[in-house]
Image (cartoon, rainbow, N blue to C red):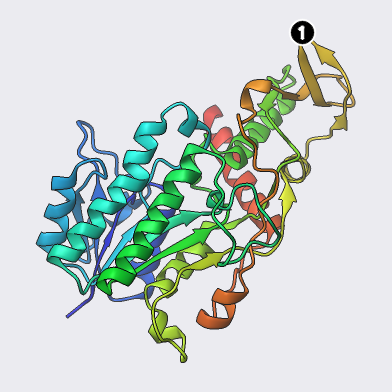
Amino acid sequence: MNNKVVVTGVTGQDGSHLVDFLLENTDCHVVGCFRRISVPNYGNVEKHLDNPRFEKAYFDLTDNESIQNVVQKYKPDYFINVAAQSYVGASWDIPVATWNINATGVLHILEAIRKFSPQTRFYNAGTSEEFGNVLYSPQDEEHPLRPRSPYGAAKAGARHLVKVYRESYNLYAVQGWLFNHEGERRGEEFVTRKITKGVSMLKRFIDRGEKPVALQLGNLESKRDWGHAQDYVEGIWRMVNQQEFNPNFEKPKDYVIATGETHTIREFLEKAMTHAGIPFKKSETTIEGQQIEYFHPETGDALVCINPKYFRPAEVNILLGNPSAIENDLNWTRKVSFDDLIKRMVDRDLELVQSFDH
């Protein structure tokens, strides 16, 4: 009988990549969880709706009854939770909702598994934002959790719950600290996708001989450890199958999933503009209170401006993960380089922007 895998957040980047991975690389039966809304949005998993190994279920992290219903009905072999309020910037505006979704929702899942399906292997999506105001680099599994945002605090709270339930009830419950992982399916509210979409729009304006609308960004000096989401979902699958990949397995553990490289947002931006074929020069000009960061050397048009509203109330200046534990224990490696990640994202957005003209 095929293993049954419940996956939440399947319309998002990580969830959809995970469904792709499971249907293409395993014989598992996948239960994809959707929120019940008036107009269904199946997003990146719509292509799987006719697959007999894919099944829809309705689920909401803020609705304990729906969580219990899913766990009781399916008693899954695996429950992989990658649903979340995942935008760090928004967590200052909606801190209570962020906590209810990212922490309390996880508690409800753990309780449902404990009561109705204790054999289920549970994975919860963690984040490098839990490390926050870092004490050392690169950050590993022993680094203290020092979050600097409501989002990071909620995820850290969830991680403590995962650990407590693992140790108290002998559940197979783990949380991965996934450092920044991006891709062509990234939401436009995230800075990487905002850059690649914005750069593609700049390219369109320039090619049409029109005055570009400058891309508005915040702190360009923040450093992040960026990988591709496709690589990271494979790491998630290895985390819920640790005994299959680790000959020295004793008990389930939490792991950092990262590349071990860090780059500034400025590097990401400049590489994206270069790949799109946009000439640019650094600027020191301020117009109407806005700092022009880059301009077009031939036309003088502003390309990128710094807007203070995109700065966080409390900034995390550097995040750099140490993936050596998951590499050594579970034989996981990233495949997509930083440069290739940017190229793939820019190429996809250039295609989307060009489709506006057809």
How many tags in the picture?
1
Note whether 222 is above or below 253 in the view shown.
Answer: above
Position of the N terminus by quadrant: bottom left
Can residue 13 be seen from the camera position used here? no
> 10 Å neighbourhood of mark 1: few (<14), some, or many (≥20)?
few
| Relative height, residue 91 to residue 6 (above, below) | above
Residue 306 falls in image quadrant: top right
Of residues 348 and 262, the one nearer the viewer is 262
Image coordinates of residue 182 in percent, x first then y, are: 56, 51
Residue at image point 57% right, 58% down: 144
Q: Position of residue 100 (x, y in %)?
A: 32, 40
Question: Relative to residue 222, is residue 125 drawn left or right?
Answer: left
From this viewpoint, which residue is outermost toward the bottom? 247
* Vertical side of 283 occupied by 254: above or below: below
Residue 323 visible in the snapshot: yes
**Which structural element holds mark 1?**
loop
9 relative position to 320: left or right: left
Residue drawn at x 51%, y 63% as measured from the top left: 232
The residue tagged 1 is 288
Q: Amino acid at mark 1?
A: Glu
Q: Position of residue 180 (x, y in %)?
A: 58, 52
Residue occupying image coordinates x 43% and y 67%:
236
Q: Is residue 296 left or right of residue 305?
A: right
User: Considering only vertical position in the picture, is 108 above or below 163?
Assistant: above
Q: Residue at x 64, y 67 (%)?
A: 322
Tell me residue 210's x, y (percent). Answer: 72, 18
